[in-house]
Image (cartoon, rainbow, N blue to C red):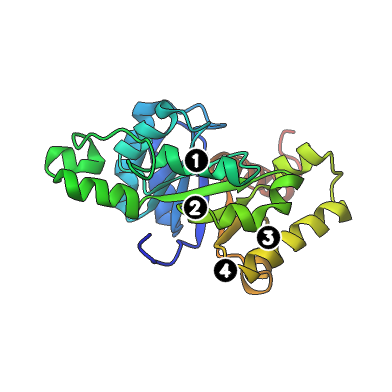
Amino acid sequence: MTGDAFPQLGAWVKLPAPESVELLALAGFDFVVIDAEHGAIDTRTISTMIGLARGCGLVSFVRVAGTAPRDVQVPLDAGAAGLFVPQVDDAARAREAVRATRFPPLGRRGASTSGRAGRWGLETLGDYLRTGNDEVRLVVQAESAGALSSIAEIGAVSGVDAVFIGPTDLAVSGQFEENDDRMADLVAAAERRCADHRITLGTTASGNASELLDRRGYDFLVLGADTTMLCQGAHALVRGARTAAPGARR
């Protein structure tokens, strides 16, 4: 990889509206993760979002649904800076994600310089292949107890640039209750393993960004989703108006 520092503060993009990317850029985010796993966003809109992000100076990732050629080829050819791959439970799955995102002989990604990643055919084949293998970032998501136990081995796989701890799927897969100490212990142990092995580590943050970055060793955070920000902002406006004008219609 290029060795550049990982962009620090990001947001999920779940709405199929390119304007979300522009608004997040204006808010000062460093990167966006266009969510093709949970968001209802078609490939044409993903491509538009990637182009808009590049124009706004945002690093754009796409969270893919899987590692089939159709999952990874479209966003990478559209010029995404990298992929988030969910449900990577062990080193074997991490190696499969690497193979899906790298050109031969490192992987099996198909090549075409005719898209944005190839500067619409202006890029030489050699530069296009070098960029795809050396500069595209692969972030694998650790979302189970087994993945957290194997996080050092996952992060050590050549071609994996970062590991992202997904707390929601971790809680669901482990059937942990909210604020369960067992889950907290698993995450803390994974954090220590990543620090010991110098693995670039990310997760989601909810009001605790400073703690995660300054004291718990995280390198990058996803602070929320465009949908959540819209919902919470709208709720706050309505609550404020109702409080200021108690007689307002409920």
Circle 2/circle 3 CB separation < 8 Å: no
Left/right placement of residue 107 relative to residue 151 reads left
Where does residue 31 sit, x and y in percent of width and height?
A: 44, 54
- How far is disc 4 from disc 1 in space, using C-alphas? 20 Å
Indicate the secondary structure of the residue bearing disc 3: loop
Circle 3/circle 1 CB separation < 8 Å: no
Single out the residue that lies furthest toward the bottom: 214
Answer few, some or many: residues within 10 Å of disc 3's Cα (few below 14, many 20 plus, some between 14 and 19): few
Q: Earlier in the sequence, mark 2 or mark 4?
A: 2
Above/below status of 223 relative to 117 = below
- How far is disc 3 from disc 1 in space, using C-alphas? 31 Å
Circle 1/circle 2 CB separation < 8 Å: yes
Above/below status of 228 relative to 179 = above
For discs 2 and 3, the disc positioned in front in the rendered view:
2
Above/below status of 248 relative to 148 = above
Q: Amino acid at mark 2?
A: Val
Q: Nearer the viewer, residue 26 or 209?
A: 209
Q: Which residue is mark 3?
A: 207
Q: Which residue is mark 1?
A: 97
Q: Earlier in the sequence, mark 3 or mark 4?
A: 4
Q: Nearer the viewer, residue 25 or 76?
A: 76
Q: Earlier in the sequence, mark 3 or mark 1?
A: 1
For discs 3 and 1, the disc positioned in front in the rendered view:
1
